[in-house]
């Protein structure tokens, strides 16, 4: 029989991988069956954007869940979740650059500079690239755990950027971006609270109380 | 139901109308929800009968018009117009209606009437998007729009009661709505219950919601961008394929020849 490691490698990870591809499969199915609505480009763009945010939140949920449940094995799946956030971000950007802007570089550059929600979204996308590139074991070794971890704290900024990108896009109904904002605040807030909880109050010697 | 004998109009565009499916399933009508698909779903049981429109303010003959009277008094025409949404998509819509000026002439506005203010029904029971609370659609209800009197009197400006030869579907603003084809779609207020003639420029719903983003005039203008997105080009719903570029947006949505004179001498960047 499989031992635990083999089970993770050959069963659980492929299962998560397939699950994470379901949103894309649904999108392709809808495209092939002409079910993307009256404005297919808007639908594709919104849909892929939604999944970037969802995978970012899932990635950011790993640490809090691990701390709260003590289930350290979760850490093994974080890289895949983060890479799927990057994967959907690539699709999201591609749908913008290709379908929406028709690869007209001058227009894209103007958009990125001129429109704050695109500036923030694009910056977040750029920040995801080094994280994806340094996600291999070899890169972790090369950077050293500490530097690697520092670099990957960028994901907090990326999460905030993603939510702000959505918030600045909507016309008047901010409910949906607000939901992501609340989830993100909880996930990041947990880290602050957790850190404070874990560091014992150190009283510097000689301090007057 | 069918609208009999609506005359064809020389003011119609020759462009191919957008499919009835797209026109009736892709709507911005926040009273019924902010998703484009919401109005088609949530407006199904909207009661448009009985319906009346109150005419108030600076007119010699203020009145409450039962909806049927509009159909009786004004000959209906088919007007096929381009519709350009502020969100940079467009359609071609075969409206059925009558020129607003026909109504205004009958009401005899006083010399103090400089603007016309329109109001949509306020009924949160029927219009779930109007339900109060912190988490509403983000607009102040009821929805209010306005035109300068000369814009309201322009032959292109109509009150529409039908679409594709039939009475207006609820999600498109039944039973009676404004259509001003050279302005962004949100100016063409839906499900009107009140028309007021006033001296001062009305404060419209979108001006209240975002004064830096939505002006009183809101003429379609490819050279004045929305602060958050470009207005230079647009996506024609249902016509362009996934992989075709957007089409250029035309000044005054292509109606410059007819309406540009309304704005001579005005800085359209300032009066956006």
Image (spheres, coloured by chain):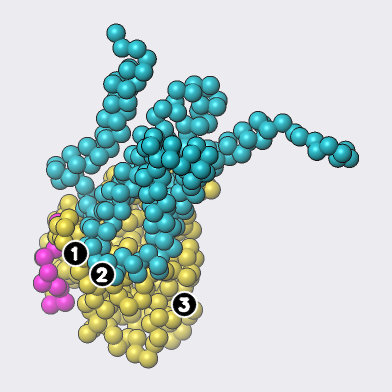
The chain holding disc 2 is: B
Q: Is A18 in front, or is A145?
A: A145
Q: Nearer the viewer, mark 2 or mark 1?
A: 1
Q: Could you say which disc has been placed on residue A207 in the image?
A: none
Q: Is disc 2 surrounded by few (<14), some (14 to 19) or many (20+) residues within 10 Å?
A: some
The answer to which of marks 2 and 3 sits earlier in the sequence is 3
Q: Find the distance from the CA under tag 2 to the CA under tag 1.
A: 9 Å
Q: What are the residue bounds of the magenta stretch?
A: B10-19
Residue B243, by quadrant, is bottom left
Q: Nearer the viewer, mark 2 or mark 3?
A: 2
Q: Could you say which disc has been placed on residue B245 in the image?
A: 1
Residue A52 visible in image: no
Q: Name the element at disc 1.
A: loop
State the hue of chain B.
yellow
State the hue of chain A.
cyan
The answer as to whether the residues below labels 2 and 1 share one chain is yes
Measuring from the top left, give residue B131's x and y in whole percent: 47, 47
The answer as to whether the residues below labels 2 and 3 share one chain is yes
Q: Is disc 3 surrounded by few (<14), some (14 to 19) or many (20+) residues within 10 Å?
A: some
In the rendered image, the vertical position of residue B50 relative to residue A7, given as above or below:
below
Does residue B186 belong to the magenta stretch?
Answer: no
């Amino acid at each position: 029989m499989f031992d635990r490691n083999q089970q993770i490698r050959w069963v659980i990870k492929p299962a998560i991988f397939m699950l994470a591809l379901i949103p894309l499969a649904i999108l392709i199915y809808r495209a092939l069956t002409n079910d993307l609505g009256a404005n297919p480009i808007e639908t594709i763009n919104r849909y892929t954007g939604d999944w970037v945010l969802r995978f970012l939140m899932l990635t950011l949920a790993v640490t809090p869940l691990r701390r709260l449940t003590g289930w350290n094995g979760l850490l093994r799946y974080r890289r895949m979740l983060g890479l799927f956030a990057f994967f959907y971000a690539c699709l999201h950007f591609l749908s913008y650059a290709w379908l929406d802007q028709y690869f007209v570089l001058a227009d894209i550059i103007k958009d990125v500079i001129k429109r704050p929600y695109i500036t923030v979204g694009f910056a977040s996308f750029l920040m995801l690239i080094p994280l994806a590139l340094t996600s291999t074991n070899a890169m972790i070794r090369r950077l050293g755990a500490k530097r690697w971890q520092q670099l990957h704290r960028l994901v907090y900024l990326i999460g905030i950027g993603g939510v702000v990108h959505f918030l600045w896009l909507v016309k008047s109904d901010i409910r949906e971006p607000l939901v992501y904002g609340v989830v993100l605040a909880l996930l990041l807030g947990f880290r602050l609270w957790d850190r404070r909880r874990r560091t014992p109050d150190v009283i510097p010697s000689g301090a007057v109380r | 139901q069918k609208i009999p004998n609506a005359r064809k109009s020389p003011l119609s565009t020759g462009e191919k109308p957008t499919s009835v499916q797209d026109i009736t399933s892709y709507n911005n009508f926040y009273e019924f929800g902010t998703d484009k698909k919401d109005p088609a779903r949530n407006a199904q049981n909207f009661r448009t009968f009985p319906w009346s429109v109150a005419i108030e303010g600076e007119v010699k003959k203020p009145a409450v018009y039962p909806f049927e009277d509009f159909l009786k008094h004004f000959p209906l025409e088919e007007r096929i117009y381009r519709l350009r949404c502020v969100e940079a998509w467009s359609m071609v819509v075969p409206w059925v209606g009558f020129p607003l000026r026909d109504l205004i002439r009958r009401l005899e506005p006083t010399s103090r009437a400089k603007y016309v203010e329109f109001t949509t029904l306020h009924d949160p029971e029927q219009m779930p998007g109007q339900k109060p609370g912190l988490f509403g659609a983000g607009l102040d209800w009821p929805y209010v729009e306005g035109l300068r009197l000369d814009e309201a009197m322009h032959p292109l400006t109509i009150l529409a009661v039908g679409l594709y030869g039939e009475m207006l579907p609820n999600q498109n603003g039944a039973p009676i709505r404004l259509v001003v084809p050279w302005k962004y779609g949100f100016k063409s207020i839906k499900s009107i219950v009140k028309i007021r003639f006033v001296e001062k420029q009305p404060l419209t719903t979108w001006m209240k919601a975002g004064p830096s983003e939505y002006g009183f005039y809101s003429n379609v203008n490819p050279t004045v961008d929305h602060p958050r997105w470009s207005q230079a080009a647009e996506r024609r719903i249902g016509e362009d394929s996934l992989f075709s570029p957007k089409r250029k947006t035309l000044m005054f949505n292509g109606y410059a020849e007819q309406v540009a004179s309304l704005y001579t001498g005005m800085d359209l960047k300032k009066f956006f």
